[in-house]
Amino acid sequence: MSRQEEAGSKYRAGELLKRFLPYYRKYWKIVVIDLLCAGLTTICEMVLPMIMRYITNTGMNDLAALSVHVILRLAALYLVLRMIDTMANFYMAYTGHVMGTRMETDMRRDAYAHLQKLSDTYYNNTKVGQIMGRITNDLFDVTEFSHHCPEEFFIAAIKAVISFIILSRINIALTLIIFAVVPVMIVTCTIINLRLRSAFRRQRVQIGELNARIEDSLLGQKVVKAFTNEEKEKAKFEEDNQKFFQIKKETYKFMAAFGTTTRAFDGVMYLIIVAAGGIFMVKELISPGDLVAYVMYVGTLIATIRRIIEFAEQFQRGMTGIERFVEIMDSDIEIFDEPDAVPCVDVKGDISFKNVCFAYPDDHNIVFRNLDLNIRAGEKIAIVGPSGGGKTTLCNLIPRFYNIDEGEIILDGENIRHYTVQSLRRNIGMVQQDVYLFSGTVYENIAYGREGADRQEVIEAAKRAGAHEFIEMLKDGYDTYVGERGVKLSGGQKQRISIARVFLKNPPILILDEATSALDNESEFQVAKSLQELAKGRTTITIAHRLSSIRNSDRILVLTDEGIMEEGNHEQLLEKRGIYYHFYTTANELK
C-alpha cells in the first residue's frame, strides 16, 4: 500500500464531481427525462397528504359536503397519479440504470485506453491486482451513483421546498422548529460521512492488495509447491485477509453510527410534532386535518432525509470508485507523440546513440552516461556483459519503452522522438527470453503479430520459424488452446511461436533479448536455426549469455556499467584478451 493510499484522498469531492460530470454529456436527454420522471413521482407522492387534509377537515366541519361522488373523484385523481408514478418509476429504474451502466462502460474504456499509453515505469511500480480492481470492482458502484445521484438530490430538493412551503402555510412556528433540527442533522451526518468515505477508500485499496496477493501466489503456484511453501503463502494471505476484515469492520462501525444518528433525529422530529403539535391543536392554532397533513408531510420529509442518508453509503462508494478512476487518468503519460511526429516508413535500420544519458525514472539509478554507438543497416550486433550493465535497457530505449534523459537516438538519420510511437514500434520486432503467450489458440497468438493476416500467412510464418511441424502434432493443430501464459507448451515451443509472431510482423529491425538462454540444448539448437532465418536481411541486435550463439555476429559489444568497454568480432575480441576473452574462457571451462 502506497503512502498516498495510506494518507487518504488527495482529491476534494467537488473536483471529483467536476471530472465525472462530462460523462453525462452523451446522455443528457436521458438525464432530463429521468429527472422529469423523478419530479412526477415526487408530485404524485406530495398530493396524498393534501387529499387526506381535505377529507379530514371537510368531514369534521361539514360532513354533508363530503359525498360519495366527491370521494370517488378524489380516488380517481389519486389513481391517475399512481399510474403516472408507476410508469415514471419504471423509466427511472430501467433506463436510468442502463444509462449508469453505459457511463461505467465509457469510464472503463477510457481507463483501459489510458493504461495502454502508460510506460513501463508505471507497471514496474503498480501491482496488476490493484490495476484490475480499479477498472473492474471500483467502477461497479459508479453505475448506481451516476443514476441515483442526480435523482435523489433532485427529489430531495423538490420535497424539501414543497414541504417547507406547505408546512409554513399550515403553521409557520411549528415548521421553523422542525426545520431548525435539519441543519444540525446534516452537519452531524456529514462528519460521519467523511470518515465513511475514508474507510471505503482503505477498503478498496486493501481488496486490490488482496487481489494482487492471490494473483501472485496462483501464478507462482508451481514454485510454491516446489519449495513446499503452501503454509507460508497461507499465512501471507491470512495477514492481508485480516487487514481487509478490520477495515470492513471499521466501515460497518461508521455505517451503524450513520444509521443510528438518523433514527435519533427522526425521533426528535416526531417528538416535536407530538408535543408542539398537540399543544397547538389544544390552543386551536392548528386544526386536526391540518395536523394530519402536517404529520404526513413531516413523515415524507423524514423519509426523504433518511433516503438521502441511506444513499450516502452508495454515494461514498461511488465517489471512491470515481477517485480511483481519476487516479489512473492522472497517471502521467511519459511516452507520447511529439507535435511534429511523422510516421516511420521505409526503414533501413541505421541506428545511432549519441551522448545518451539515462536513469530509470522511479529510482534514478544511472544506467548510461554519454553512450555513443553506431549500428549500420543490416548489421548483426551482439551485446554481452555482466548482469546490470544495461544490455536490456539499451534495447528497450530503441522502441521508446523509456525516454532518454539526454542525447539522441537516431534511426535512419532522424531522432526517434520525431516518429510516431506506434509506427516506430511497428518496425521493430522483439524476441525475449520470457515469452508471453496470450490465453487463446496457437493461431491467435501467431496472428497477433500482424492485424489482418490470413491463415495461410500465419502458417507460412510458423514454417519459417520451424514451428509448423510440432503445431500440426498438437491435439487441435493451430486451434489448440495454449492455456494461460502458454502453460500447456514447452519453453522451446513457446519461443518458436513467439518467433513465428515476429516473422509475421516482418520488421526491418530485430531485437533478440536472451532468446535461447532458458532452453535446453535441443530446443536451443532448433530456436537458433529459426532466429538465423529471422535475422536475414535485418538489422539485428542480440543480447546473449551463451557466447556460442553470437560467434558469427558482425560485431560484438562488451557493455558494462561503465559503458562499451570492447567491440569487434569474435576473433578480434579474443586477441585482445580482455573482458570478452575472460567471459569466453570461463564459459568453456564450465562446459
Image (cartoon, helix red, strand yellow):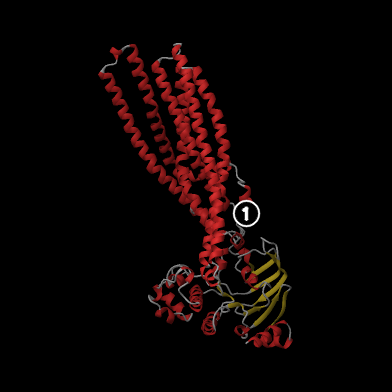
Q: Which residue is rendered at x = 35% and y = 22% of the image?
A: 51
Q: Which residue is mark 1?
A: 2
Q: Nearer the viewer, residue 418 or 247?
A: 247
* Among the 4 quarters of the image, the one containing residue 395: bottom right
* Among the 4 quarters of the image, the one containing residue 406: bottom right
Residue 24 drawn at (x, y percent):
48, 43
In the displayed structure, would residue 166 be above or below residue 530?
Answer: above
In the displayed structure, would residue 193 be above or below residue 489?
Answer: above
In the displayed structure image, the side of residue 431 where residue 92 appears, left or right = left
Q: Which residue is rendered at x = 54% and y = 40% of the image?
A: 254
Looking at the image, can residue 325 be seen?
no
Looking at the image, can residue 211 be seen?
yes
Q: Quadrant of the N terminus?
A: bottom right
Q: Quadrant of the C terminus?
A: bottom right
Q: Nearer the viewer, residue 345 or 470?
A: 470
Q: Amino acid at mark 1?
A: Ser
Q: Which residue is rendered at x = 47% and y = 25% of the image?
A: 270
